[in-house]
């Protein structure tokens, strides 16, 4: 009997140690976000965060003294100008707004103020060009809808033009449109990524027959889809060491209306201990091919302090869903 109890105890301790090494029971105390950007001549196997430019919280504070942080950058290049939209959290209100910076060279950015403000929280301002018009699909989960805005006078004057998904609270909605495929994925707030499909941007968006894409610690979209050859890559946030820890790249392979998902580049972006602005983690990426170059923007946050806080429930929950997703992948 003693041997059985000893075996159970040792097995339990080993299991706890394994879970803690993968999803720590104590996570970082994190602080404000900043934005970085750069470019490459080919698709980068890794992003040289150390040599890229940073637009920091402190820099934006020079122009807007009520800035708390800037995050979730998305960009469009229109003619000779880069337009960078971002979540702008202020110290004077709970709900974040969408800010704008522009650059003529993709290196030196100028702040142009707030372009979208609502009575609910806004973030993740994915901007797209579609049939010579400009649209934005930001996260607005507090509205319980996925709303789409159209620029009346780009890059300003955004007005609601459609509700893509009704009566569901979804985070970080991320859209991909092509001649043969129109999909939207979003985080459900319960460690699950959901997929919706339509026959066009303004068509009826409905759940894909395989509605759940991913579950677990990596299940929240973290930036724009990127078509790289035959691959359709999606940045996905990794919350292994708390929210905002890192970002992995997943591939979605579609065939006959069905799809398979696989992780291509684990922790493509993660905490950068020797960069103060990004020493806690990184969680968003927008990469696009501009001519013969690959231009990208991303964000990261800094440590509030060196202390950690308990997150045992979160670690156990993520481990359970990760195991469930792994088993589903094995038997698919």
Image (cartoon, helix red, strand yellow):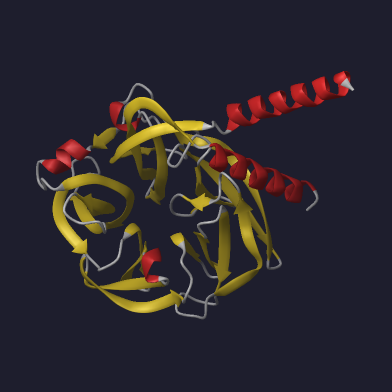
Q: Position of residue 311 (x, y in %)?
A: 50, 37
- Which residue is most to the front? 1
In-image side of 243 versus 327 (left or right): left
Q: Is residue 306 visible?
A: yes
Tell me the residue at 53%/70% (across/down).
179
In-image side of 126 versus 192 (left or right): left
In-image side of 226 versus 231 (left or right): left
Q: Position of residue 216 (x, y in %)?
A: 60, 47
- Observer-nearest of 280 and 224: 280
The quadrant of the rendering that contains the N terminus is top right
Q: Is residue 59 above or below residue 132?
A: above
Tell me the residue at 42%/42% (across/down).
283
Tell me the residue at 32%/25% (across/down).
275
Tell me the residue at 64%/25% (across/down).
17
Residue 129's image quarter? Answer: bottom left
Number of numbered discs on residues = 0
Q: Position of residue 213 (x, y in %)?
A: 62, 57
- Which residue is most to the right? 1
In-image side of 86 versus 16 (left or right): left
Q: Is residue 59 above or below residue 196?
A: above
Q: Is residue 46 visible?
A: no
């Amino acid at each position: 009997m003693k041997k059985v109890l000893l075996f159970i105890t040792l097995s339990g301790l080993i299991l706890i140690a394994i879970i803690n090494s993968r999803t720590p029971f104590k996570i970082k105390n994190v602080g404000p976000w900043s934005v970085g950007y750069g470019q490459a001549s080919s698709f980068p196997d890794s992003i040289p965060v150390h040599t890229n430019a940073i637009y920091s919280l402190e820099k934006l504070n020079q122009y807007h003294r009520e800035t708390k942080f800037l995050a979730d950058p998305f960009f469009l290049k229109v003619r000779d100008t880069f337009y960078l939209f971002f979540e702008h959290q202020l110290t004077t209100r709970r709900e974040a707004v969408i800010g704008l910076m522009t650059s003529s060279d993709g290196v030196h950015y100028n702040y142009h103020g707030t372009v979208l403000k609502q009575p609910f929280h806004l973030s993740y301002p994915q901007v797209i060009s579609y049939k010579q018009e400009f649209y934005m699909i930001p996260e607005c989960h507090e509205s319980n809808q996925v709303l789409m805005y159209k620029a009346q006078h780009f890059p300003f004057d955004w007005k609601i033009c459609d509700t893509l998904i009704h009566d569901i609270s979804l985070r970080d909605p991320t859209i991909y449109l092509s001649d043969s495929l129109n999909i939207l994925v979003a985080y459900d707030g319960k460690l699950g990524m959901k997929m919706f499909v339509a026959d066009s941007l303004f068509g009826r968006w409905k759940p894909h027959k395989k509605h759940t894409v991913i579950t677990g610690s990596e299940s929240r979209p973290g930036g724009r889809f990127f078509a790289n050859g035959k691959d359709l890559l999606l940045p996905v946030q990794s919350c292994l060491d708390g929210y905002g820890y890192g970002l992995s790249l997943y591939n979605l392979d579609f065939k006959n209306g069905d799809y398979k998902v696989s992780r291509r580049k684990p922790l493509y972006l993660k905490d950068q201990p020797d960069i103060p602005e990004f020493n806690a983690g990184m969680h968003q990426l927008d990469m696009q091919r501009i001519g013969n170059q690959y231009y990208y923007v991303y964000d990261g946050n800094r440590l509030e302090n060196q202390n950690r806080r308990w997150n045992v429930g979160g670690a156990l929950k993520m481990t359970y869903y990760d195991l469930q997703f792994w088993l589903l992948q094995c038997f698919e």
